[in-house]
Each structure stands twice: as structure tokens, then as C-alpha cells.
Image (cartoon, grey):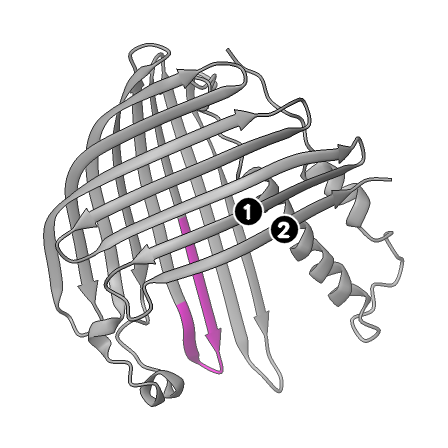
Amino acid sequence: MKKSVQFATASVLASVLALPVMAQQSELLGIRGLDDRIDDIERDVAEDMARSQDAARFGNPEYRQGFSGSASLGYSGKTGNNESQDLTIGLRLRDAQGAFVQTLGAALDYSESDGNSTKEDVFAIYDANYYFNDRAYGFVMARVQSDGLADRLSADEIAAGTVLSDKVQRDGFLGFGPGYRVVNSNDMTWRVQAGIGVSYLEYGDGSSVTEEAGILSSRFFYQLNDNVFFTNDTDILTSDAALRANNDFGVNFKVTDAISTRVSYLSEYNDSRAIRTDNKLGVAIVFGF
């Protein structure tokens, strides 16, 4: 059972936003810089539009059987008045064997300016799902996020009174549990999953906390008509150290065949922070003509 609303995608964005190829891509005139900036906008809007798409929304996703994957690498280096290096690496591996699907993803983001590291971020996640039928499934999930600069304080952080024990250097979680599709129809789907596991937090001053944790997730989809659908995705991770919760509500609608829009509201809650809640309003619009 699978039905989806078709919206403008990255390929449409590319045709709409891309500047004509010019024989002389002059950096001095700013043409290349503008081209790169438009590419960044195109990517960000495409990612925002794609957030509402869920390959597992209607049941066992129809992944290609066997092993598959993709990898990407980006590097730039600059010398002269300023010296800097930027390196990004992305990796996604998937193995599908019948009803058992495993996915491994990893991303590395490194930046250096005038010989000093300004970013050393690593994020990796392992996700395994076994689909018993169209409604019931089991999952195993592991993730780790690392900030290589969490043991250092910038001048602004020192001025703000930040201490190393406030900065998370490594954040890890390993959990497993069942999942179930409460509603699984063409116009509405809702699935929930809950599990138990272990949470690990290591701070910039070297202290760490390892404890039992629980995770609860909900994925809701409702299609009002052929042009409008709503999504609401919720994740809650709780342990003695902190209660962390994210809720992402979005409305996607196709105004015309040439205009698609997504409006989203993301709330992130963490009761271990001084300001517990962060909210973000997002609007993505794609024009084609």
C-alpha cells in the first residue's frame, strides 16, 4: 500500500535556480560565488522539502535487495591572506535481506582556519529493522555524535560563563524495541515505536555518565486531499541525566503544478539546558516556470 503526493524535487530546483553556464566564471566579478550560494540555497530547500518523505511510511520499504550504498567527499583549501581547510565526508550503506533491512550512515565535518581547528564533528548511526508483517516490526538503533572541540572554550564562551562540563564531547545511544503501525491507510498512517537502551554522555572536562534510557517515537501522516498533507514526527529520549524531545510538525501543499510549499515548526527540548526549548519555523517554496 503506497501512495504519495508528488512535489517539486531537487531536479526541479536545479532547473529553476541554476544560473546559465557562463564561459568566464570570474571569481573577481562574483559570478562563481553567487553560483555557489544559489547551489547552497537549492540544497537547503530540497532537504527541507524532503524531510516529510518517509520511505517506511506505508510498510516494509521496497529497498533493493542485497548490498548498496553511496559515499561523498568534499574538500577545499585556501592560502594567502587567510589559510583555511574544509573537509566533509558522507557515507551511507544499506543491506536488505528479505524482511531484514540494515542501514549505516556516517558524516564527518572538519574545518581549520590559520592552523587552528574550528570544527571536528563526527556523527554516525546504525539502524536495523525486521518487518514481521505490514504492521509489526522490531528495531535496533545505535548512534554516536562527537564534538572534537568540546574540551576547548572560545573567548565568547568564556565571557558568557560557559564551563567545560556544559559542553558535550560525545553523545551515544544504543537501544532496541518493537514498533507497530496503528493506522495504515492511503490517506492516514501512524506508527509508534518504543524501546530501552543505554545512553552515554561525555563532557568536555572528561566526566561521563552512562545510564539506562528509554526511547519513544511517533510518525504521523494525514493526507487532506491530492494537494495537501500533514506530518508530525516526535522523538523522546529519557534518562536520569536529561529528558530530550523533538517534535517536527509540517504542512506540505501544492499550490499549482508549478508551486509547492512546506511550512514546518520544529521544537527541541532538553531539560539539562538553561534554556530548555529551542523552536524553529521553516518555510520552503519551490517555483517552476
Q: Which residue is mark 2?
A: 283
The disc at residue 264 is 1
Residue 259 figure quarter: top right
Pointer 1 and pointer 2: residues touching (CB < 8 Å)?
yes
- Mark 1 residue crowding within 10 angstroms, few (<14) / some (14–19) / many (20+): many
Q: Nearer the viewer, residue 166 or 83?
A: 166
* Dominant secondary structure of the residues highlighted in magenta in the image: strand
**Point 29% across, 79% down: residue:** 152
Q: Nearer the viewer, residue 166 or 172?
A: 166
Separation of marks 1 and 2 at Cα, in angstroms? 6 Å
The boundaries of the magenta stretch are 107-119
**Point 38% across, 55% down: residue:** 268
- Which amino acid type corresponds to the residue marked 2 in the rendered image? Val
Q: Is residue 243 left or right of residue 287?
A: left
- Which amino acid type corresponds to the residue marked 1 in the rendered image? Ser
Residue 238 appears in the picture as rendered: yes
**Residue 147: in magenta span:** no
- Mark 2 residue crowding within 10 angstroms, few (<14) / some (14–19) / many (20+): some
Residue 8 appears in the picture as rendered: no
Q: Position of residue 242 (x, y in %)?
A: 20, 57
Quick check: 143 above or below 84? above
**Point 70% across, 54% down: residue:** 39
